[in-house]
Image (spheres, rainbow, N blue to C red):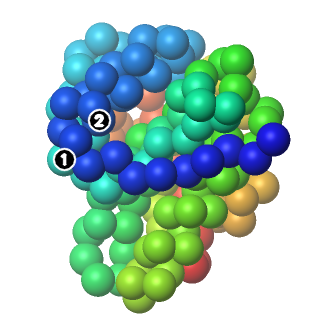
Amino acid sequence: MKPEISPVTDVEERRRLTRRMLEGLKSWFGIAESRKAYVEEAAFLRFFRADLSGDFAGLLTIKQHNEHSAEIHLMGVPLEHQRKGVGRALLKKAERELSAEGVKLLKVKTLCSSHPSRHYGETRAFYRAMGFYPLETFKTLWDEHNPCLILIKPL
């Protein structure tokens, strides 16, 4: 079954979906203040939702920096829908739209491999499989316990 990807324009619906997704993925999003910030930021960004058989299956938000570059602000797929092509479908939809608008580079931030999280190892592997390349690591962008890896992908 193929995920259905659609935009979400209602601000409250964006907040509700983001909150729901983040609460179910605390192994990735374990810091309560960060979850709260994601909910508020996602409400005002380009927002895609994925559904499988009518069931909410994930989301992706995009922050556009300028006419040439954009960033995956947030992407998440509930555990029960992981490894079913949902993340891939969300990313491909966003890439098609951004590319059609002339965006040339897509960026994402994630935890660096020096952090021991198995979950973020899976996240890095996903982005690498989707064509992203490591660009730079910032050891204190978030804080000293959460080194940030920036990955980029030419569109």
Q: CA distance from mark 2 to mark 1?
A: 8 Å
The outermost residue toward the bottom is 102
How crowded is the residue under tag 1: few (<14 C-alpha within 10 Å), some, or many (20+)?
some
Q: Is residue 34 above or below residue 8?
A: above
Q: Amino acid at mark 2?
A: Arg
Q: Position of residue 97 (x, y in %)?
A: 47, 73
Q: Is residue 133 visible?
A: yes
- Is residue 13 rendered to the left or right of residue 135? left
Res. 38 image quadrant: top left
Image quarter of the N terminus? top right
Image quarter of the C terminus? bottom right
Q: How many marks?
A: 2
Q: Foreground residue, 112 or 22?
A: 22
- What residue did someone put label 1 on? 44
Q: Foreground residue, 127 or 4?
A: 4
- What residue did someone put label 2 on? 14
Q: Position of residue 46 (x, y in %)?
A: 31, 55
Q: Foreground residue, 56 or 30?
A: 56
Q: Position of residue 70 (x, y in %)?
A: 37, 67
Q: Residue at x 56, y 62 (%)?
A: 93
Q: Is residue 138 visible?
A: no
Q: Amino acid at mark 1?
A: Phe
Q: Position of residue 45 (x, y in %)?
A: 25, 51
Q: Residue at x 30, y 11 (%)?
A: 32
- Is residue 31 rendered to the left or right of residue 126? left
Upstream in sequence: badge 2 or badge 1: 2
How crowded is the residue under tag 2: few (<14 C-alpha within 10 Å), some, or many (20+)?
many
Q: Foreground residue, 36 or 90?
A: 90
Please, what secondary structure does the residue beneath circle 1 have?
loop
Q: Is residue 3 above or below residue 146?
A: below
Q: Are marks 2 and 1 in contact (CB under 8 Å)?
A: yes
Q: Residue at x 68, y 32 (%)?
A: 53
